[in-house]
Image (cartoon, grey):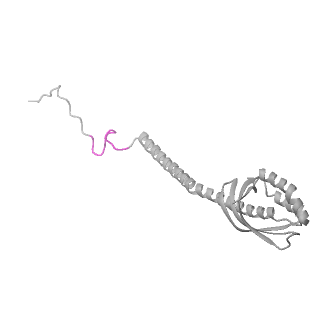
Amino acid sequence: MTASIDEDTPATPAAPEDGIESPQDSGAPTAAATWRRSLAARWRLLATVCFLVLSMAIAALVFFGPHRDDRETAAASAQALAAAQEGAVALLSYAPASLDQDLATARSHLTGDFLTYFSQFADQILIPAAKEKDVHASATVVRAAVMDAHPDSAHVLLFINQTTTSRDNPTSAQAASSVKVGLTKVDGTWRISSFDPA
């Protein structure tokens, strides 16, 4: 007797042959997935490089910024200190025989209102007295210190000894004083803008 096959019974799918997998079951990546992973890796590398560069730039700015300001302030202090001492000596040293040259040298160290004031003082008082009484003056800076310094302005404290002789008093007379010198940078050169007792 022949067994009949029920037409309604679903057929059992054939098992795949050994060693052959369907595309859905295989773990092999598709071309699109490989491209996406490669692109993501490149973006991660680029982001890491950008982060490192930015970090180095910020570190350099933080480190070198204050040091640059310190160097500029130190340079301004040294230049202003030297200019104050040289200018003060020129301002307080003169002799009748070289008076015009001495005063021209003194004026070259000055600026602003103080230059105007000194020129008037020299013309009205200093020149007549020096010539009439044969006054010789010589100044030296004993001590000096920067009070404050900025790129274009500074204040320096000077301790000065001035020696004078004259026809009426040929014996040297010495005077000690302290002066607060204000300086302004004009066309890259430090000049005295104020000269006040301290």
User: With 176 as the anchor, is 121 left or right in this view?
Assistant: right
| Residue at x 24%, y 39% (from the top left corner) | 15
Confirm whether residue 112 shows in the render: no
x and y, in percent, of residue 190 in the image: 75, 57
Q: Is residue 195 above or below residue 142?
A: above
Looking at the image, residue 157 lies above or below residue 57: below
**Camera-nearest residue between 53 and 161:** 161
**Main secondary-structure element of the magenta-colored stretch:** loop
When asked about the image quadrant of residue 107, the answer is: bottom right
Could you tell me which quadrant the N terminus lies in? top left
The quarter of the displayed image where residue 25 is located: top left
Magenta extent: 16-28
Viewed as shown, does residue 169 lie left or right of 76? right
Identified at 56% across, 52% down, the residue is: 57
- Residue 26 is one of the magenta-drawn residues: yes
Q: Residue furthest left?
A: 1
Percent from the top left, x then y, of residue 83? 74, 61
